[in-house]
Amino acid sequence: MNLPRPLPVMIFAAGFGTRMGALTQDRPKPLIEVAGRALIDHALDLVTAYTPPRTVVNLHYRADQLAAHLDGRGALLSHETPDILDTGGGLRAALPLLGDGPVLTMNSDAIWRGPNPLPHLAAGWDGAHMGALLLCLPPDRALGHAGPGDFTLAPDGRLSRGPGLVYSGVQIIDPACLAGIPETVFSLNRAWNRLAAEGRLFGAVYPGHWCDVGHPEGIALAEDMLAQTHVRD
């Protein structure tokens, strides 16, 4: 089977990390360590193994620290200044660095146990029918996430809002769906809602485990999850 050509990757790393409390008073959230390594490094491990043509990281809060950490790592930096742009605005601002066509985006505050989520998701992308393809998990395999889920998955793979699956923070999206949104600062939820109404929002289920490290309790949960991986290995 011929694998699809790797897509450009954008890592969202500009946020303030307010849910982390005191841990982000002196550093950006992507530099918080899990199992002795910064969150951004865990993300870059997955990206490097995927071998995309370009990797872009957006920066805003304590951008100088993160830029210094990424120096020499081969990532292009999209500085959001003076204002942070949210996910939709951030993606739009980074498009000159990413190039044309669909983009694989990922959050930097998660830890994974299982197959690399990037090629796993890319194998299911069909740009002729999809505007976005979101990687999701059932709640019992989404550590550190409270609630019944974000999306309902139909038998044909289309997503709608409602309980069922948790969005993992990894997606493939066609930036053309951002057209018609006039604001500079906006969430990708705006684009997803439009795509869902058009029947072009799709989902795929990740077969492994995932941990949200957007809050302090997630650090220990992620480290325990990784320890279980090592025991099984």
Image (cartoon, helix red, strand yellow):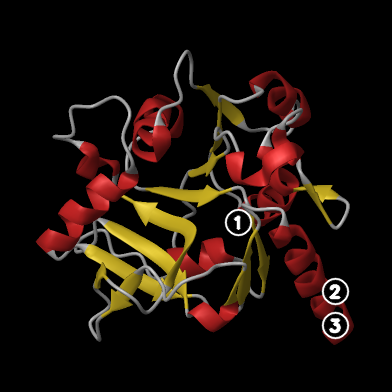
Nearer-N-terminus badge (1/3): 1
Task: Determine whether label 1 and label 3 are within 8 Å by CB.
Answer: no
Q: Measuring from the top left, give residue 15's x and y in whole percent.
A: 55, 35
Q: Which residue is mark 2?
A: 227
Looking at the image, residue 183 lies above or below residue 194: above
Q: Mark 3 Cα within 10 Å, few/some/many (few <14, many 20+)? A: few
Looking at the image, residue 74 lies above or below residue 227: above
Q: Measuring from the top left, give residue 29's x and y in whole percent.
A: 67, 40
Q: Nearer the viewer, mark 3 or mark 2?
A: 2
Task: Determine whether label 1 and label 2 are within 8 Å by CB.
Answer: no
Residue 126: quarter of image: bottom left
Quadrant (top left/top right/bottom left/bottom right) for the C terminus? bottom right
Indicate the amino acid at tag 3: Asp
Nearer-N-terminus badge (3/2): 2
Task: Tell me the distance, in whole angstroms, between the alpha carbons under discs 3 and 2.
Answer: 10 Å
Q: Residue at x 21, y 55 (%)?
A: 193
Q: Which residue is mark 3?
A: 233
Q: Secondary structure at mark 2?
A: helix
Indicate the amino acid at tag 1: Tyr
Q: Is residue 233 left or right of residue 80?
A: right
Q: Which residue is mark 1?
A: 50
